[in-house]
Image (cartoon, rainbow, N blue to C red):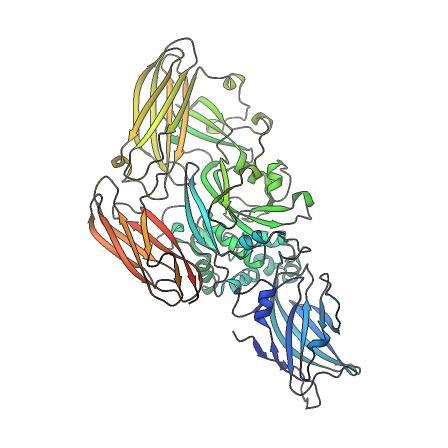
Amino acid sequence: MDFMQQSTTKINGFNNSHCQLKIVNYEVEENSISHETHGLSQKHLVVRRGKPFKLTLLFHWRLWNPHTEYPVLEVFLGNHSDRIIVQISDEQHDPQGWSAKIYPGDIQSKSVTIHICSPVNSPVAQYYLFLHIETMHRSRSTFEVGTFVLLCNPWLKEDPVYMPLKAQREEYIKNDCGILFTGTPQNINERPWMFGQYEPGVLEACMKLLQVSRWHFNNKEKDYIRRADPVYLSRVICAMVNCEDDLGILMGNWSGDYRDGVSPAEWSSSADILHQWALSNCKPVRYGQCWVFASVLCTVMRVLGVPSRVVTVFNAAHDANSNLIIEEYFSSSGEKLRGPKDSTWNFHVWVECWMRRPDLGSAFDGWQVVDPTPQEKSGGIYCCGPCPVVAIHQRFLRASFDTRFIYAAVDADVVRLIIHNGRVMKRTMDTETVGRLICTKSIGSDLLENLTQDYKSKTKPQAAGYGRYSGWRGGQDRPMSRDEEMPPGLEVSLSLKRVPTVGESIVLCVTVRNNSSSSRVLMEHVNAQLKEYNRNAQESFWKSHKEECIKAGEVLKLEHSILSSEYESVLADDDIMNVAVVIKDVLTKERFLATQEFNVTSPKITVEIEGGGRIQMKKEYKAHVSFTNTCSSSVNGAVLTVEGSGLLQGKQEARMAILKQDEKIEKTVTIMAAGPGTKLLKATFSHSNSPKAISRTFHKVTVVSA
């Protein structure tokens, strides 16, 4: 964009004796550096509230006459406007109100530089600016100066999103590339994500999002006023990232069928999603799941100037009935059953936004959970938060917004019930599984930062004090009986010998400790099921049943191996395995349950770029991509796909009709970057035996100017 704009006048019949504005210089380079907005837009001047920015005005023949003419700026937002008397002064601006100053050294014969400062509590929006030259006789000439976009200012102490440390601001406002953590606590997957706030059109899409919100349609003037508050902003954007109630960005889909859209696992860039939404006239983008919703929300909030980060909660509870108890049901053979609406997701991803909370008091300032994944309604719409992290830690469940639901997500108790012939045979309480690990990307590196201690205190109330469970088939609520809390005669645990990789056997270790004074005859049932990260387990694909004897005081260790040939045909790269063991005392009919959920490490796709991961703009480089089949047998219809926005036009593929065990499929592509920054080269391997990708990798490429 050419930020030199010819001005237009709104008064007729002027002549050479009139003061007439000719050109407005937005001083975009200096303003964008000063306001930390460089690269956010190629179309608009983007500045931050509470900090002066400058415009240089060039007139046709002369400046206004200081004895008979008076310059007044008028800034419009919707139907509201503020008049700003332009003063010649060396004094500092007051960030509490609009001001416009001319420093004596900034006045020339035909041009003048005006320094304009907005109030620190100004709404986030696009503003329209006009210049009036008024006379003592109440006549005036009016000139259109142009527009500017005003954002929150985390660099300014008076702003409610102020963040004191430079390293934090660099990470949570300016960094356009992050790391998402998925999988399970035992086997964490890392994948880069491009937030892309500097991509052309992203800021404009974010501003459009505000303009098409239900709040703006219902009452434009009220919406403009409330946009000064980051609490309100975060709630509006949270609702607008999903499309359940409005013209929001993303449509959720957890069915596994993505034929009329894009699989959530395929996305790696918020900018791609925002561009598609904006160019389609606000038609929802298909499809998103929790990490996609959260990443897009993080992008929008960073663009608006609110420090934000993506957070993963491993073993996150979805407490639909708000009793802080999650019920899980198992058959007497160890098969996990479909139960009530409550569930535990292997991982869930949300956003933390940094802001003050004057509505709650300074004790609740700081990081706030904002969750755009449409799970439950809040205030009649699908949004969640902002909820203070400190309120979750202190278990202050009355704090707004949605604290009880978010607390359950990280610290609910799990009641597991064994069902036989419609009756509850055994209940166990697990107080440790939910919120096992809560983490985000570290500042200045791709390492994991553990946030668990910020959410969970070392001590928590006993379950009977705040939770009840319904029992099987909707039975009456009742607390756990005294007998059920007594330590069992048998202790049963289930563990993995090691985290498996595709092609390896899964080795399960069952440990049974007999604490009683008599021998026992046991029936062991072990069961394996496949599940997606947030859904119920599917039908069993592997089972084992056998009888064992255990002596008094003995510890029995039992090993089971699930061969790779027994799981490879049903496994895709993002699937989770649920394994459970039920030990039944043949004489007393007592049953004991232990469970484990884990993910199998996908076979690796190798990406090697000529010259390493740092390339120069507008220069061609070779990227060599390869995949070796580590499966236990050959696969049919093998496809290796390579793509990369900003690096490669379209998709490029290598295909093999049959890829034998330990055989390699390869593809060499030529990449070239048109602009600087971080880019992602994505490689995917799939085959006709499986409907989903078997392996996927994202390789970061740093592009520098020549």
Q: Nearer the viewer, residue 130 or 398?
A: 130
Can residue 422 be seen from the camera position used here?
no
Q: What residue lies at 34% left-to-right and 28% top-to-bottom?
A: 508
Say left or right for 311 vs 379: left
**Residue 314, percent across and down?**
47, 39
| Furthest residue in direction top, as rendered | 517
**Residue 51, percent across and down?**
66, 63
Question: Where on the picture, by quarter, is residue 20?
Answer: bottom right
Q: Relative to residue 179, is residue 216 depicted above or below?
A: below
Q: What residue lies at 48% left-to-right and 49% top-to-bottom?
A: 445
Can residue 632 be seen from the camera position used here?
yes
**Residue 176, percent across and down?**
49, 57
Q: Relative to residue 8, is residue 592 depicted above or below?
A: above
Quadrant occupied by the C terminus: bottom left
| Furthest residue in direction bottom, as rendered | 16
Q: Nearer the viewer, residue 89 or 570?
A: 89
Q: What residue lies at 49% left-to-right and 17% top-to-bottom?
A: 487
Say left or right for 180 vs 136: left
Looking at the image, how many numbered discs can be counted on the residues? Answer: 0
Say left or right for 610 vs 393: left
**Residue 632, percent across and down?**
23, 39
Q: Nearer the viewer, residue 335 or 576?
A: 576
Q: Relative to residue 515, is residue 307 depicted above or below?
A: below
